[in-house]
Amino acid sequence: MTSMHSDRLPGHPHIAYVGDELFVEQTPLSALAQQYGTPLFVYSRASMLAALAAYQQGFAGRQVQICYAMKANSTLAVIQLFARAGCGFDVVSLGEMRRVLAAGGLARRIIFSGVGKTRAEMHAALEAGVGCFNVESEAELEVLNEVALRLGRQAPVSIRVNPNVDPQTHPYISTGLKDNKFGIAHERVVQTYQRAAALPGLRIEGIDCHIGSQITQETPYLDALDRMLDLLEAVERAGVPIHHIDMGGGLGIDYNGETPPQADALWHKLLDKLDARGFGQRALMIEPGRSLVGNAGVCVTEVLYLKPGEQKNFCIVDAAMNDLPRPAMYQAYHQIVPLKPRATAPETWEVVGPICESGDWIGHDRDLSVQQGDRLAVLSAGAYCMSMASNYNTRNRAAEVLVDGAQAHLIRERESYADQMRLEHLIT
Ligand SMILES: *Cc1c(COP(=O)(O)O)cnc(C)c1O
């Protein structure tokens, strides 16, 4: 631990030990925990903007719309930050669209994705004027056409194709293989575009794919781009022009020493391929989520009890699977580090939450030097944590703070028990 003092944490450029304390930018986490309580999510504004800048640098001089896939972290102030930085948004529900509009994002920069859009969602999104519907099935095309005609509009559409490449990631977050529920099988793509072109309520804009999440290699992207361009050529040969190519999201982050490609380096290679195949002038879209916010966030938690045992030592903390669902859901790994490292020799702990489920764990076999009352930071908690949080065990969802240098903004208050019970009724 001592080697970490006044060190940046690898993969987390805005999180560092300064002296004996863990800081996000110029703000000590212990002061935030003191002020706002735990569990507490803390995000670095600079880290989010730096992650976005890596994409923007990769695309310098090109016609590209970056649409932040906000399901990764849909807190209003996070959306506002990306909207002000020029991002559009990839939304997967009407609720997400409402959040974008409430945070000042533009409807025309919204892409509406998802396999199960309802008629009501299509109607509201058309009325708001979203930029594009990423359509995932032939049946959905027919319904979208009907809804648009009834409104007297044309729906802008892109068709999500399934390029059938293996993103080499966890099966739950791999989406571009044949047996996934997402997208249209590549042998049906030309027919589907021809059908869409014949429907008067639709206007064809693009072609899209999204092959998976937490992708740490560049090969799946290069393969997917080749298949997308093959399909695009086939569709245009069949007489249906396509304006933009949307390569989805999925770029991974460093949770535990992974070395995903940098966004700018990856896009340098993808743009070379586009140029080589004669598509360098085509408008592009991308939908990054995790890679913009994941390593910008930590979850601060307090050690409630230590329970050493014969087989295992349990370190029981006040954050749980309702706050940090990824370990229980995907056996995911998050680094766990102390806010104030101790000099004593570490022991091995099972770091677990208070929820009545054996699946409520945050880290297995972690070497930590801890005492009751210490605070720990669970790293890489900016993506798919708060946005997946629940009230299981009637636990209030955590508060969130956005750090900007030495300034901290409370962007979400801790939920109250009254908030949780507000919509319920006793029987009279
Ligand atoms: C989830 C999702 C994304 C973002 O994925 P990340 O792995 O967070 O980058 C992009 N596009 C679609 C359609 C998605 O469902």
Image: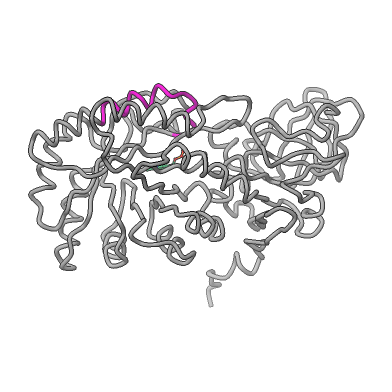
Give the residues in magenta: 213-228
Q: Residue furthest front?
A: 61
What is the residue that sits farthest to the right in this orientation?
344
**Residue drawn 33% across the image and 52% down it:** 112
Q: Is residue 166 left or right of residue 84?
A: left
- Quadrant into which the N terminus falls: top right
Instruction: Residue at 21% x, 30% y: name it.
Output: 186
- Is residue 134 part of the magenta span, yes or no? no
In depth, the one of 359 and 102 nearer the eye is 102
Q: Is residue 220 magenta?
A: yes
Residue 414 located left or right of residue 315: left
Q: In the displayed structure, would residue 141 be above or below residue 407?
A: above
Q: Based on the displayed image, in which of its 4 quarters is residue 184 positioned?
A: top left
Residue at left offset 20%, top offset 31%: 231
Q: How is the image coloured?
A: one colour
Q: Residue at x 54, y 69 (%)?
A: 424
Q: Position of residue 359 (x, y in %)?
A: 62, 36
Please count the marks in the image. 0
Q: Dominant secondary structure of the magenta stretch?
A: helix
Q: Quadrant of ligand 1?
A: top left
Q: Residue 352 at what x, y percent from top left?
A: 71, 38
Q: Position of residue 69 (x, y in %)?
A: 44, 47
Above or below for 308 versus 18: above
- Describe residue 44's horizontal placement relative to residue 340 as left or right: left
Res. 308 image quadrant: top right
Hey, which residue is sitting farthest bottom in the picture?
428
Which x, y percent locates residue 296? 62, 44
